[in-house]
Image (tube, grey):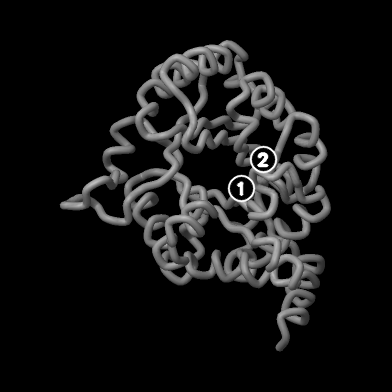
Amino acid sequence: MSAELQSCVRWLTWVVSPPSCSRGIGMRNKLVAGNWKMFGSLAENQTRLTQLAGAQLGKNKADIAVIPPFPYLAQCKSLLSPAGISTGAQNVSDHAEGAFTGEVSVSMLRDFGCRYILVGHSERRSIFGESDTQVAQKFQRAQNGGLTPILCVGETLDEREADLTEQVVQQQIQAVLDLVGIQAFSNAVVAYEPVWAIGTGRTASPEQAQAVHQAIRSQLAELDSGVAANTQILYGGSVKANNAQSIFAQPDVDGALVGGASLIADDFIQICKAAG
């Protein structure tokens, strides 16, 4: 069966028999996570975090998280936890412990009060050569350690122009399914980040984002409709205060993984409010 025909079959299956959920489709909490990447300083962070904490975002209906570089986890936790904002880490070792200089284990991140861990970000895949297999192992390590993995998936511009978006994204997700199974997604988040939209100023249209999010949920639903209906699927890629609301309005978009805009407190606050 061709990839195009498989996609049609999945879509028809979704339409005829959508995943069921006790809370109902569209009742998933929104999640907005700010990925600071390799930016920040103690002084800059103090100003930014104080502003975030003072915005009372913890009272929103949406879940909020900040994902800073490792050295600033304690600072973030200290300032954000009282405001009901979670913290997360940008990476984790696929080893439990040992002689792995420069690596950080899941137990160490748990000591710092992390709730989330990014796995499979496109920069980790493309710059640091992380394979689908290694990403899956990190997903498993994070989850076994009691933390929630945010699995990042997405296609390059060449892959989108070759009409390979769904194939690429589904392959990245399938590698995790093959290792941990569908039930693991009961305590996980998926973030669709088209590589061509990360840090470029280009954003997938709300309709483009919805199409891929629906395909991801359909892939999960083939194995367990209940898990699929409850899995948060975030969009990432040049999310800004002026486009967040239209993206969040899509039925299968459950929030955002925000890059550059998360470094500007006012912008990040507006995105969080749009979700809440």
- Residue 100's disc is none
Residue 25 position in % (x across, y down): 73, 49
Around disc 1, counting alpha carbons within 10 Å, would you say few (fewer than 14), some (14 to 19), or many (20 or more)?
many
Q: Amino acid at mark 1?
A: Gln
In the image, residue 216 above or below residue 233: below
The quarter in which the C terminus is drawn is top right
In the image, residue 4 above or below residue 257: below
Rendering quarter of residue 10: bottom right
Which numbered disc flags the more N-terminal residue, 2 or 1? Answer: 1
Q: Nearer the viewer, residue 22 or 27?
A: 27
Residue pictured at 47% horizontal, 36% vertical = 38
53 sits left or right of 236 in the view: left
Q: State the SS at label 1.
A: strand
Q: Residue furthest bottom?
A: 1
Residue pictured at 70% horizontal, 38% vertical = 239
The reply to whether callout 2 and callout 1 are in contact (CB within 8 Å) is yes
CA–CA distance between discs 2 and 1?
8 Å
Label 2 or label 1, whichever lies nearer to me, is 2
Q: State the SS at label 2.
A: strand
Q: Nearer the viewer, residue 131 or 39?
A: 39
Q: Amino acid at mark 2?
A: Gly
Residue 247 position in % (x across, y down): 77, 42
Q: Nearer the viewer, residue 182 or 250?
A: 250
Residue pictured at 65% horizontal, 61% vertical = 156
Report the residue marked by disc 1.
232
Residue 165 position in % (x across, y down): 69, 66
Q: Residue furthest left?
A: 99
Around disc 2, counting alpha carbons within 10 Å, would you say few (fewer than 14), some (14 to 19), or many (20 or more)?
many
Report the residue marked by disc 2.
255
Rendering quarter of residue 78: top left
